[in-house]
Image (cartoon, grey):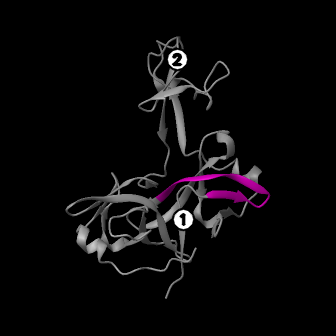
Amino acid sequence: MAQTESFTIGAHASCEDGPCGTVQRVVVDPIARTVTHLVVEPKHRHGPPKLVPVEVVDSTTDGVTLRCSTAEFEHFDAAEETQFVAGTVGYENYESGQVLSWPYFGLHGGQAGSVGGVAEVPGGPQTYTEDTLPEGEVDVRRGDPVYASDGPIGHVHGLAIDRDSHRVSHVLLAEGHLWGRKEVAIPITAVTSASYGINLRLSKKEVADLPAVAVDR
C-alpha cells in the first residue's frame, strides 16, 4: 500500500537553516489530482506568500520542512500580486496594470486595512490583491467549505497525498463533526469539483459511515 503524508494547512514551515513561515494553502492540479505547490506565508508576513514546489517539501510531525535555504525560499514565485485600483487617488489617469505593485505592508508606517480584498489607506490610494497560481490549477485553503450531495458537511483541514506521486488520496475534514470523530478523511474519488469549495458525490450519512483512515504524519 502506498505511503501517504498529510499537509495540514496552518502548519509551520522551516527551511534547512531556520523557520520561514506557515502553510497558507495547497495548490492542486484538478485534472491530474496532484499537489503541485504549497503556498507558504513568510514569517512575520515579510513579503507576499510564496509558491513552493512540492518536490522540495517534506512533511514532518512538527509541520513541513523545505529542502532549500531561507535565501532560496525568498526567490520562489509570489502566490499573490497586489495592484492599484484603477482611478485611485493620485493615479486617476492610469489603469491598474500600468502602476507598479503596492508594498506589502501599506504606506505611512503602518499596514493598510482591507475591505473585501481591497486595501485602504485613509486619504490615500487603494489596492487589490489577487492570486497568481499556475494556469489551470486551484488552491485549497483551510476552512474551505465541504459539501456533501445533500448539503454542507464541514470544512477543509488539509490534504493527504501519496508520498511518491504527489497524487491527492484524501481530503481531511476539520475537527468537531457531529459523529464524534476528531478527523475524517474523504477519498479524492468522492470529490466532484474543487473550484468553489469541495463538492462530494457522497451524502452526509455516507461520509459519517466512512471507515477510519490511518494517515502517516
In this view, 206 is above or below 84 = below
Residue 164 spot, x, y in % from top left: 56, 77
- The reply to whether residue 202 is in sight is no
Compared with 44, 145 (above or below) is below
Whether residue 53 is in magenta: the answer is: no
Quarter of the rendering occupied by the C terminus? bottom right
Q: Residues within 10 Å of mark 1 (few under 14, many from 20)?
A: many
Q: Which mark is residue 7?
A: 1
Task: Give the overall secondary structure of the magenta segment.
Answer: strand
Instruction: Left or right? Give the position of 195 relative to 96.
Output: left
Rendered location of residue 177, percent (x, y) = 36, 64
* Amino acid type, callout 1: Phe
- Secondary structure state at the residue bearing disc 2: loop
> Which range of residues does the magenta coloring cover?
12-27
Q: Position of residue 43 (x, y in %)?
A: 68, 46
Q: Which residue is mark 2?
A: 125
In the displayed image of the protein, which residue is found farthest to the left? 150
Residue at left offset 33%, top offset 70%: 179
**89 lies left or right of 15:** left
Closest to the observer, 178 or 33? 178
* Residue sitting nearer the eye, 130 or 100: 130
* Mark 2–mark 1 distance (CA, rounded to whole Å): 38 Å
